[in-house]
Each structure stands twice: as C-alpha cells, then as structure tokens.
Amino acid sequence: MKLPNGILGAFLFLLLSLLATSIAAVLAGAIVKSRGGVVAAKSAIPITIVWIEIFFVSLFTGTLASGAVSLAAVPLTILFSSYCGNVGERIQREYYSDTTIFGIYPYHFIWMVFPLFVYSMMTAAWLPYLVDALFHNGLGASFSETLLHLLSLIYTLLPF
C-alpha cells in the first residue's frame, strides 16, 4: 500500500521533530539535575506552538494529513520531552558527578560553541546542494553531475 505524499511528509516531519525534541530534552534534564521532566516540557513550548500553528494553517489549506498529524504532535511533543527530560536527569544523577554534564565540565561548553557554529554553517550551506542532487537527475541532468553533487556531502561529514 502506497501512502499519499502529504501523509508521508507530515509523518516524517513528526518523527524528526520528536527525535530532535527528545535529544534536547535529555540534555536539558542532565543540565538541571532536578525536575528534568518539567524543565524539558517547558523547553518544548516553542515547537509545540509551531505544531499548533501548522494545525491552524492546515485548516485553511485543506490538507487533512498535516492537520491530523499536527494535532497529534502537540501532546506527543510534551510527553516525549517530559519523559526524556527525566531520563537525562536520571542518567546524570546515576553515572556522572554533580560538577559535570554527562562527564563534560561546564567550561568546555564555552569553547565548543565556535566549532559547532562553524560546522552547522558548513552543513546549512550544503543543504541546497543536497536538494539539487536529489532532484537534479529527475530534471534531466547527467548521472555524473548528480554523483558529483552527492559526493560533496563528504566535505561536511569530515572533521575540520
């Protein structure tokens, strides 16, 4: 059975959103070290507002799939973030000392901002090439051009 593109796209967006929210919630729970679920649920408010906005937009555009998925995403986002915040808090408390966050001393987070920023800019600058490579061959480009675009991903995956 083949799913329509609207349902599949909305569902994949939901899965990616829940994955990113869960990772951030684990980190938030480890940082606060107490009441991690509550803090992580509060930190999920912006993405919850985005899901509510997607629901209201879908009411006017007539896409039932994105409306149903976004309506289900609101409680799922809060539940996932609360649970994962508690998991991060428990992992931090059981396995690491109180002076670290997952074994990393807090002063390391200051200097890590620069390499992460540079790496994110490198990846964001490459994303249009990914879209171009995925759809380029369908627009009549040669196989070698498409392969060349896909191989450019190596530069963003390699460390500096």
Image (cartoon, rainbow, N blue to C red):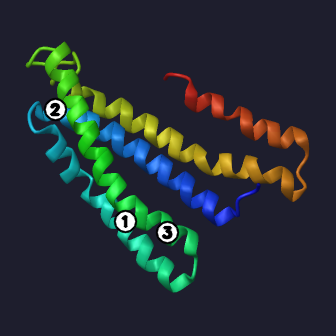
Q: CA distance from mark 3 to mark 1?
A: 14 Å
Left or right of 154 on screen, residue 138: right
Q: Earlier in the sequence, mark 3 or mark 1?
A: 1
Q: What is the three-letter code of the residue carrying label 1?
A: Val
Q: Nearer the viewer, residue 124 or 51?
A: 51
Residue 36 x %, y %: 16, 38
Q: What is the three-letter code of the residue carrying label 3?
A: Ala
SS category of the residue bearing label 3 = helix
Left or right of 44 on screen, residue 106: left
Is residue 19 shown above or below 115?
Answer: below
Left or right of 62 on screen, residue 30: left
Between label 3 and label 2, give the one nearer the viewer.
Answer: 3
Which residue is disc 1 drawn over?
50
Residue most extreme to the bottom: 60
Residue depicted at x 28% and y 60% = 46
Residue most extreme to the front: 1
Residue 68 disc label = 3
Residue 139 x %, y %: 85, 58
Whether pointer 3 and pointer 2 mark residues with C-beta atoms closer than 8 Å, the reply is no
Q: What is the three-letter code of the residue carrying label 2?
A: Ile
Q: CA distance from mark 2 to mark 1?
A: 25 Å
Q: From this viewpoint, is residue 96 visible?
A: yes
Which residue is disc 2 drawn over?
31
